[in-house]
Amino acid sequence: MEDRLTAIREAYPRLSARASADWPAWNCPQEDLLSVLSQLRDEHGFDFLTDVTAIDHYEQRPRFEVVYHLYSTQRHEYLRLATPCEDAEHPRCVSVTSLWAAADWHERETYDMFGIQFEGHPDLRRILMWDAYPWFPLRKEFPLAGKEVALPSAELEEVTGTTAKPAPMMGGPFHAPQKGRMSGREPRADDESWTETKERPTEEETGTGGALREFKETK
């Protein structure tokens, strides 16, 4: 694999190494993105686009990066490529749907969650939230619990008498145990000392991290 990576780096000297704990990873300028991905697919066997996602660096510039995870079904090798979106207010990235049809839904989800416009996408619509939803839930400034907002249907809101409310954050974050029977591996809160009806203990009452420490010690 190292020979293939060297050949691509020589063909595209503007690629730069990217820190990675697992797969080989590069940073790629957007103007080279389609050409590099096409060569990776056609000449180096990375024929399967497993995922397209994004990173919000928030106060850094560039704020947004789009990340591509590639896989070779012949050699069972992975590769990661990231490209920056220069405009922090209205991030844009070239669509790769011309290379992989599967990028259609991947890019729609990334647009829906991060607000990145994919230029050249054939049908860039929200895929999880409704069309009129005003925010992008995976941006760093979006509250972890979400925001209260009117439901997408006036009739639904009238019938239910409610709105889309923030998620309860009692005791979170939530994690599923990694061992044992699946039937007993429902996600549990890290800190079960407080609930929606029982207020969270203060540090003065428990000591710093006391409630969480006591909970873990009883597991």
Image: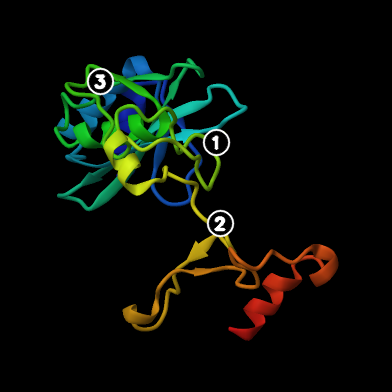
Q: Image quarter for residue 130?
A: top left
Residue appearing at x 30%, y 45% in the figure:
159
The picture places residue 22, in percent across and down from the top left corner, at 42, 51
Q: Position of residue 192 (x, y in %)?
A: 60, 72
Q: Mark 2–mark 1 contact, CB under 8 Å?
A: no
- Which class describes the residues within 10 Å of circle 3: few (<14), some (14-19), or many (20+)? few
Q: Residue at x 16, y 32 (%)?
A: 100
Task: List x then y, in percent, for residue 74.
Answer: 15, 49
Residue 175 vertical position relative to residue 32 in the rendered view, above or below: below
**Numbered badge on residue 15:** none
Where disc 2 sits, the SS reads: loop
Identify the amino acid type marked 3: Ser
Q: Which mark is residue 35?
A: 3
- Residue at image mark 1: 140
Q: Quadrant of the image for the N terminus?
A: top left
Please, is residue 22 above or below residue 113 in the view?
below
Residue placed most toward the observer, 6 or 181? 181
Which callout, 2 or 1, points at the residue further toward the start of the chain?
A: 1
> At x 66% / y 82%, what residue is drawn?
217
Quick one: 73 or 65, which is closer to the camera?
65
Looking at the image, tell me whether mark 3 or mark 2 is earlier in sequence order: 3
Circle 1 or circle 3, nearest the eye: 1
Q: Label 3 to label 2, Cα distance in Å? A: 44 Å
Image-quadrant location for residue 209: bottom right
N-term-proximal mark, 1 vs 3: 3
- Horizontal side of residue 144 vs 215, given as left or right: left
Residue at disc 3, secondary structure: helix
What's the mark number on residue 169?
2
